[in-house]
Image (cartoon, helix red, strand yellow):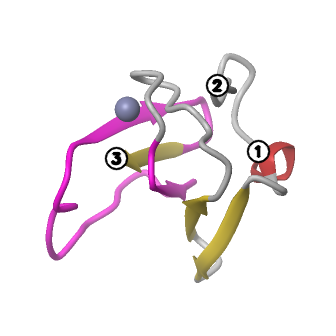
Amino acid sequence: MERIDISAGFSIHDYRTKLKLLHDDGDTRTLENRAELGCPSCGRAFTRLFVTENATASFDAPPERPFCLARTEAKLLLLAH
Ligand SMILES: [Zn+2]
């Protein structure tokens, strides 16, 4: 399984054929994993990826499933399994 590599940062463009953009408000994006990509934290396939360059992020409700966090110098990633 290909795993998202964040050792040199994270760019959606590197995985654009494997991630489907569900939501984009300019500061945050939510993407669906359409290719069994592996999570950069645990290696397991995830279902949704939330990514932001903002310093903070708030959620009205937690994902109803296990989730992992990963960060690069510029971005914060939340991966829901
Ligand atoms: Zn994970």
Closer to the camera in the image, 18 or 56: 18
Q: Quadrant of ligand 1?
A: top left
Q: Quadrant of the N terminus?
A: top right
Q: Earlier in the sequence, mark 3 or mark 1?
A: 1
Q: Residue 74's image quarter? A: top right
Amino acid type of the residue that numbered disc 3 sits on in the rendered structure:
His
Q: Which residue is mark 3?
A: 81
Do the CB atoms of the residues marked 3 and 1 lie less than 8 Å apart? no
In the rendered image of this protein, does residue 21 appear above or below residue 3? Answer: below
In the rendered image of this protein, does residue 72 appear above or below residue 20? Answer: above
> What range of the chain is rendered magenta?
46-75
Closer to the camera in the image, 1 or 75: 1
Label 1 residue SS: loop
- Relative placement, left or right, of 7 versus 53 is right
In the rendered image of this protein, does residue 11 appear above or below residue 71? Answer: below
The residue at 82%/56% (across/down) is 16
* Mark 1 closeness class: few <14, some 14–19, many ≥20 residues within 10 Å: few
The residue at 57%/43% (across/down) is 75
Question: Could you tell me residue 15's position as x and y percent?
Answer: 79, 46
Q: Which residue is mark 2?
A: 1
Label 3 residue SS: loop
Label 3 beta carbon less than 8 Å to ligand 1 = yes
